[in-house]
Image (cartoon, rainbow, N blue to C red):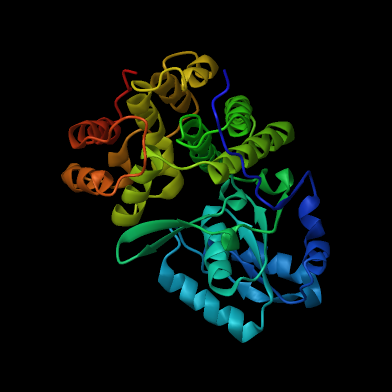
């Protein structure tokens, strides 16, 4: 028997295929805009300048200061740059950091966004924004932050370093896996989640073996889109809460944190909802958490939070923060269990479940 559910489609346009990033100018004009501020991280400033050059008179300038966890002080600088340039839309080129900045600007200005992803973050198709201020990361949902257009061009990911491809892909997989047991899960999101996990399980080992495999890159980007769509359609739970705590309060790198925590949070919840996480076990050939851990190990992903600079002395505070104002979760969030989970992740221990 199918359970009762609510499904809400998100009103954004997704354009997928090799070379489709070249259509950015046309989409700026379709949105009724004429002065696009191009956004990027400092590391991708060259690519952003090149994109602005291709946009020609449609480019209002470049702001290449996007940073992890979307610090509010960076957003304020970008907002001033947008006003000074007379920007009437934003084109975000890059991964989750750049997409987050574009969303933060859209929240404050309600100007349209075009996103051109170069990683597998998936956040470009959600109405979720996470921002960091005063050492704490908070999240919100607002239709104003959902990008109007996303141009997925697998050719832009051919040069993505293997290590970043792996962690970015596992970050995306966390959205799909957690979507399977979300409080507001629905059949459409669950189908997308399973398809996404299969696509990324197929793609990531191929990318590790042959980084410029165009088919594998397209598969990974397709999987990331599905993962992001799942995240945008259902609520977050324990996994995202812990990662927000670790990233916002301890400044751990975003994708790597998700990659390490994923097997442990899934194992924690598999004890409560084994039937909902059964597809994960089937896809990865073991118990859900253990199967994900083995898969991550097989593609060279980081597995221990201590390798990201988190100290053992940080774990008690992390457990306190993770259990304060918790997100809904299918298994009760108890401090003892969360502290144990964090210890396992810090040490890089294989989950039992």
Q: Position of residue 113 (x, y in %)?
A: 66, 64
Q: Position of residue 301 (x, y in %)?
A: 45, 33
In screen coordinates, is 326 left or right of 300? left
Q: Residue at x 55, y 70 (%)?
A: 105
Considering every residue shown, the one lying at the far bottom of the view is: 84
The total number of labels drawn is 0
Q: Position of residue 58 (x, y in %)?
A: 78, 74
The answer, for residue 41, to whether it is visible in the render is no
Q: Position of residue 131 (x, y in %)?
A: 42, 61
Q: Is residue 151 above or below residue 351?
A: below
Q: Quadrant of the N terminus?
A: top right
In screen coordinates, is 252 left or right of 223? left
In terms of depth relative to the viewer, which is nearer, 20 or 331?
331
Q: Quadrant of the C terminus?
A: top left
Q: Is residue 333 above or below residue 39?
A: above
In screen coordinates, is 174 left or right of 46? left
Q: Residue at x 58, y 29 (%)?
A: 190
The answer, for residue 225, to whether it is visible in the render is yes
In terms of depth relative to the viewer, which is nearer, 240 or 199?
240
Q: Residue at x 63, y 35 (%)?
A: 223
In terms of depth relative to the viewer, which is nearer, 40 or 290?
290
In terms of depth relative to the viewer, which is nearer, 259 or 330?
330
Q: Is residue 315 above or below residue 275?
A: below
């Amino acid at each position: 028997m199918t359970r009762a559910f609510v499904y809400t489609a998100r009103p954004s346009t997704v354009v997928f295929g090799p070379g489709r990033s070249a259509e950015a100018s046309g989409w700026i004009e379709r949105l009724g805009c004429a002065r696009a501020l191009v956004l990027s991280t400092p590391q991708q400033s060259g690519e952003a300048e090149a994109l602005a050059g291709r946009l020609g008179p449609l480019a209002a300038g470049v702001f290449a200061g996007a940073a992890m966890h979307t610090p509010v002080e960076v957003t304020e600088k970008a907002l001033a740059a947008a006003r000074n340039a007379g920007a009437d839309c934003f084109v975000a080129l890059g991964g989750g950091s750049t997409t987050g900045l574009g969303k933060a600007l859209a929240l404050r200005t309600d100007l349209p966004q075009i996103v051109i992803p170069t990683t597998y973050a998936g956040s470009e198709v959600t109405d979720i924004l996470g921002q960091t201020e005063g050492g704490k990361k908070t999240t919100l949902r607002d239709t104003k932050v959902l990008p109007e257009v996303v141009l997925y061009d697998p050719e832009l990911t051919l040069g993505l370093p293997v290590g970043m491809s792996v962690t970015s892909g596992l970050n995306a997989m966390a959205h799909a896996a957690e979507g399977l047991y979300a409080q507001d899960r629905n059949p459409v999101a669950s189908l997308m989640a399973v398809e996404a996990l299969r696509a990324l399980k197929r793609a990531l080992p191929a990318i590790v073996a042959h980084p410029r495999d165009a088919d594998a890159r397209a598969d990974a980007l397709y999987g990331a889109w599905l993962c992001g769509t799942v995240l945008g359609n259902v609520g977050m739970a324990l996994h995202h809460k812990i990662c927000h705590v670790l990233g916002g309060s301890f400044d751990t790198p975003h994708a790597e944190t998700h990659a390490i925590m994923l097997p442990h949070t899934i194992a924690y919840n598999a004890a409560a909802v084994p039937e909902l996480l059964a597809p994960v076990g089937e896809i990865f050939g073991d118990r859900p958490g253990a199967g994900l851990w083995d898969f991550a190990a097989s593609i060279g992903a980081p597995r221990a939070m201590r390798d990201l600079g988190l100290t053992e002395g940080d774990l008690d505070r992390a457990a306190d923060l993770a259990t304060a104002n918790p997100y809904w979760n299918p298994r009760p969030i108890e401090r003892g269990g969360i502290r144990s989970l964090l210890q396992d992740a810090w040490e890089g221990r294989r989950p039992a479940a």
